[in-house]
Image: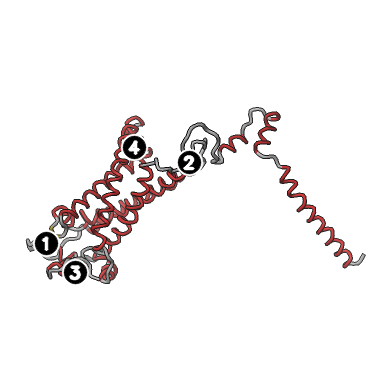
Amino acid sequence: MTTSNFASLFGRWLIAACLMLVWSLPLRAADAPTPAQAQAERVHTQPGNNAPMWREVRQDKAHFTNNPGNEAGVLIQTGGDSWRHLRNGPVTYYGGWLVLLVAAAILIFYKIKGPITNHDPMTGKLIQRFPRYERVIHWLTAGSFLVLAITGLAILFGKHVLIPVLGHSLFGYLMVLGKNVHNFIGPLFAFSTLAMIVIWARDNVWQNIDAKWIAKAGGLLSGEHVPSGRFYFCEITWFWIGVTILGLTVSVSGLVLDFPNFGQTRADMQLANLVHAVAAIIMLVLSFGHIYMGTIGVHGAYKSMETGYVDETWAREHHEEWFNDVKAGKSGHPQG
């Protein structure tokens, strides 16, 4: 037999074998027992082995039930296990470390640099920085945010931090109280956040002057005076990312969890819970910088939100462009 004849014969056999294999696949698939058939066989060969039945139950399929309601026929929702692993795993672990590291970094920065003070003495002449309605909205948002932050941290990290100290019983009572406070304060935070966005959106506009502020890091490291508008770059960034994007994300996801009677499935609630937790943690660590600068980080900043007025020296050194506009009789809002 020549080489060419052998190659031709081998090719024919190979083609025939492939055709037989392809032909047999549907037959093999058809012969495979379904879970129900496998369970029926196990009734006789392996009495008491209900593994196929429970596999069927864990498929998130709705089965027959006399109980009306959304997902009432789903006995086991397997997505809950994935949610639990994410919430109690990466979200809690990395979120906890992020909160601790950012808080520690701010504390170290304060110990090294101390507060930012004024270069020139106070004049005794006051200028209005925040009217009453702005301060009311700010403190309503800030107060509800702090209550939600404390109760939220306790709910997420309490079993790791508080149970060893308080014990299970006292922790349980506190969590029942904390959860109800959290649920009732949430809508108040959502309302005040929306109000804050409405009244301050026009003042939080990035301008060319912010580029100079960024280049000099706002004078945080050098202590140099850097001019800015009514709000400087970090305040504007906090407003849009922290208050607007994250604040609305936390609010919407929280309302989904607060009012589960609008057809939400368990998967919807689990997703909302994860989004709520992640957004709240990021918003919290960003708020550390805002709270620091508004209290101990910048001398005189807290008084501006407490009384609504600042000394002209403070206004000129921290928000020079805004100060010049107000002194010139303008509105003080960004122009163009």
Can residue 87 be seen here? The reply is no
Check residue 80 in the rendering and tell me which mark sits there, or answer none. 2
Please tell me which residue is depicted at 38% across the width and 43% down the height of the picture.
257
Please provide percent x and percent y for residue 183: 32, 41
* For residue 329, side relative to residue 109 (left or right): left
Dots 2 and 4: beta carbons under 8 Å? no
Near mark 2 (Cα within 10 A), the count class, few <14, some 14-19 or many ≥20, is some
Q: Which quarter of the picture shows residue 331?
A: bottom left
Please tell me which residue is depicted at 13% across the width and 54% down the height of the picture.
307
Please tell me which residue is depicted at 34% across the width and 29% down the height of the picture.
169
In primary-sequence order, the first of circles 4 and 1 is 1
Spatial CA distance of label 4 from label 1 is 46 Å
Dots 3 and 4: beta carbons under 8 Å? no
Q: How many marks?
A: 4
Is 179 in front, or is 333? Answer: 333
Spatial CA distance of label 3 from label 2 is 54 Å
Is 47 placed above or below 80 here?
Answer: above
Is 75 placed above or below 94 here?
Answer: above
Q: Secondary structure at mark 3?
A: helix
Disc 1: which residue: 127
Disc 3: which residue: 321
Is 189 in front, or is 310? Answer: 189
Is 178 placed above or below 21 here?
Answer: above
Q: Secondary structure at mark 4?
A: loop
Can residue 46 be seen here? The reply is yes
Near mark 1 (Cα within 10 A), the count class, few <14, some 14-19 or many ≥20, is some
In primary-sequence order, the first of circles 3 and 2 is 2
Three-letter code, disc 2: Gly
